[in-house]
Amino acid sequence: MSAAGWQPDPEGRHEYRYWDGTQWTEHVSNGGQASVAPLGAPPPQAGATAPPPVAQAQAGGGDPWAGLSGDLVDGTYSEVEGVGPMKQNSKMLRVRLDQPFMAKQGSMVAYQGNVDFAYQGGGAAKFLKKAFTGEGLDLMAVSGQGDVFLADEGKDVHILQITNGGISVSGKAVLAFSSSLEWNVERVKGGSMMAGGLFNTTLRGTGWVAITTDGQPVVLNPAEAATYADADALIAWSVNLQTSIASSFKASALIGRGSGEAFQVAFRGAGFVIVQPSEGPPPVPASN
């Protein structure tokens, strides 16, 4: 029995199929591109003749995987197929361009095909809101044909589909969204300017949005009980919820994971609140 490695596909449907040393696997390779394709015929039985050696140089220069083995080349990390937005793993998003979309500036880690990236300012009104509130999106418009891979500092990626609805999201948590959605910077209802920084980004309409969390989040149901969340750990909530600002001056040294937050966002009603297990990276000390 031969060692594990890429061999000519015994079914002839693909250039190569991975032999794990005992049986054929579902991992295939065509033109140097690995993918997954279930075997249409049963794998070799015990005692069957070992597969033939890898074919030598062909028109394209031979098998690029020859002599390599391991999870990086056996198809374990091959692309996950699908149209539109598709998680490739817990921390990376691939968008197959069937229509233009918006993405966080600097989030592209790779792309394939003829893809165009353009700065998206959002207009003067949104620029002024961002400058005044500190909330907003640094966006790039993505168009063309191909696949775009996105990630943000190794954070977990989540995809939400919105149908004639809306969601309020922390601007720093937005990775990408379909251009069919309208976005705006809005003040959290019930919050006064005295509280400071209580603004969020809303997305409304029909489309998809990919958001990131620093760790695995928890989704809370305010209909069960009044819900309070630290503003820095708060990721998103349904726009129909009633919001207010709860102060806790007397317990300011005990509330929250930071250095004694005096304000929390309070939620009531039917909907959801998404909270991450982190308040984000610590502030960078100012240089002298």
Image: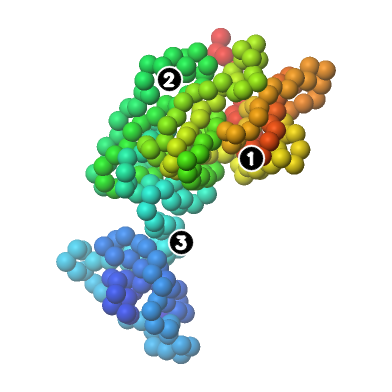
* Drawn side of residue 92 relative to residue 124, left or right: right
Rendered image quadrant of residue 50: bottom left
Q: What element carries label 1?
A: loop
Q: Which mark is residue 86?
A: none
Residue at 56% over, 9% down: 288
Residue 283 in sight here: no
Residue at 45% over, 79% down: 23
Q: Are marks 1 and 3 in contact (CB under 8 Å)?
A: no
Mark 3 or 2: the one toward you: 2
Pointer 2: residues within 10 angstroms few (<14), some, or many (20+)?
some
The residue carrying mark 3 is 76
The residue carrying mark 1 is 271
- State the separation of the CA atoms marked 1 and 3: 37 Å
- State the separation of the CA atoms marked 1 and 2: 27 Å
Rendered image quadrant of residue 68: bottom left
- Front residue of 282/144: it is 144
Residue 140 in sight here: yes
- State the separation of the CA atoms marked 3 and 2: 43 Å
Q: Do the residues labelled 3 and 2 touch (CB within 8 Å)?
A: no
Amino acid type indicated by mark 1 = Gly
* Drawn side of residue 8 relative to residue 132, left or right: left
Residue at 57% over, 14% down: 286
The residue carrying mark 2 is 126
Q: In this view, does 39 lie above or below 186?
A: below
Residue 239 x, y percent position in the rendering: 57, 33
Q: In this view, does 186 lie above or below 278?
A: above
Is the image coloured rainbow, by chain, by secondary structure, or in one colour? rainbow
Amino acid type indicated by mark 3 = Thr
Mark with earlier residue (1, 3): 3
Q: Residue furthest bottom?
A: 47
Residue 61 x, y percent position in the rendering: 20, 63
Amino acid type indicated by mark 2 = Lys
